[in-house]
Image (tube, rainbow, N blue to C red):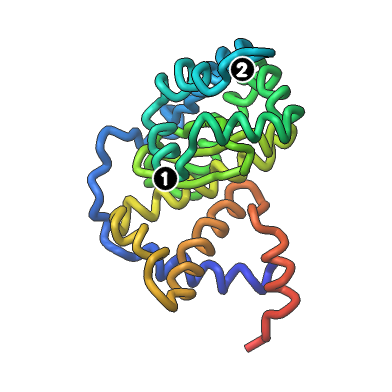
Amino acid sequence: MKKTLPFIFTLFFIFGISERIVAQANYPTSPEAAELVFTDLENFLEAYKKLGSGADSVAILNQYYFDRASVGLKDFIEKHNLTPKLIVEALGEHPEDYDKIERFVNNIDELKIVFSKTMVKYSNVLSNATYPPTYLLVGANRGIGQNSKQGPLITITRVLDDPDLLMLMIVHELSHFQQVMHMGFEKYVALYSKPDNMLGLCLREGGAEFITYLVLNRITQEKALKYLEGNLIDM
């Protein structure tokens, strides 16, 4: 890792020097004000308890989960074409994962404490960071973490038993949000659509992974790091 860090730091530095052009809306700049939004989990759990033999699962999920969606969940639904039918299919394929959501919600206060401490660590790494809400969501069991205009969006079914990985995903996506604040949302999103843009993607993802490492001493893509260290040519 030691020989890799200077390289990643260079990428992050180059990527982060853009002028801070995005209005910060009303998002706080204090880590103590960072918010973990889990209302969508509570709504899903209410719907989940109503599912059963003979129930119209699609209608129930629409009424109790989709129709009550937070702005984060609405953004996620639009970007990933999430539908009640997809969730019903995932429930049928992986019921054991969805069964764990109630315990997760019941222990949310413990997670909030860890989240708050992590945000303070984050501020020690990036003193001028912005803290949008982080939305915990239920999707079609795909384990997605992504940045959005609303803040980090994290689906939880793949990390219900791994709070460390969940926090890694949150920090990684929060780091992407800082990139958005510097370069603008349109330019940030455009990195995905440009052809032959491996360098831009490396700058974007490498920067987020570097900050994640500084905050938590781990990264989300440890397999990629092992590959890099095994194939990095000394200059």
Residue 96 position, x and y percent, is 76, 28
- Residue sitting nearer the eye, 196 or 199: 196
Mark closer to the chain start, 2 or 1: 2
Q: Is residue 40 left or right of residue 28?
A: right
Q: What residue is pinned by disc 2? A: 48
Q: Residue at (45%, 27%) from the top-left corner?
A: 35
Residue lying furthest front: 54
Q: Is residue 33 above or below residue 183?
A: above
Q: Amino acid at mark 2?
A: Tyr
Total labels drawn: 2
Residue 75 position, x and y percent, is 39, 38
Residue 86 position, x and y percent, is 56, 36
> How far apart are the two marked residues, 2 and 1, measured between alpha carbons?
23 Å
- The local crowd at label 2, few if under 14, some if 14 to 19, many if 20 or more residues have their Cα within 10 Å, is many
Q: Residue at (44%, 37%) from the top-left corner?
A: 77
Q: Is residue 172 left or right of residue 76?
A: right
Q: Is residue 13 above or below residue 159?
A: below
Q: Amino acid at mark 1?
A: Lys
- Residue sitting nearer the eye, 116 or 71: 71
Q: Is residue 177 above or below residue 88?
A: below
Q: Residue at (59%, 37%) from the top-left corner?
A: 140
Q: What residue is pinned by disc 1? A: 79
- Could you say whether the residue bearing mark 2 is in a helix, strand or loop? helix
| Rendered image quadrant of residue 164 | top right
Q: Is residue 29 left or right of residue 234?
A: left
- Could you say whether the residue bearing mark 1 is in a helix, strand or loop? helix
Figure quadrant of the N terminus: bottom right
Figure quadrant of the C terminus: bottom right
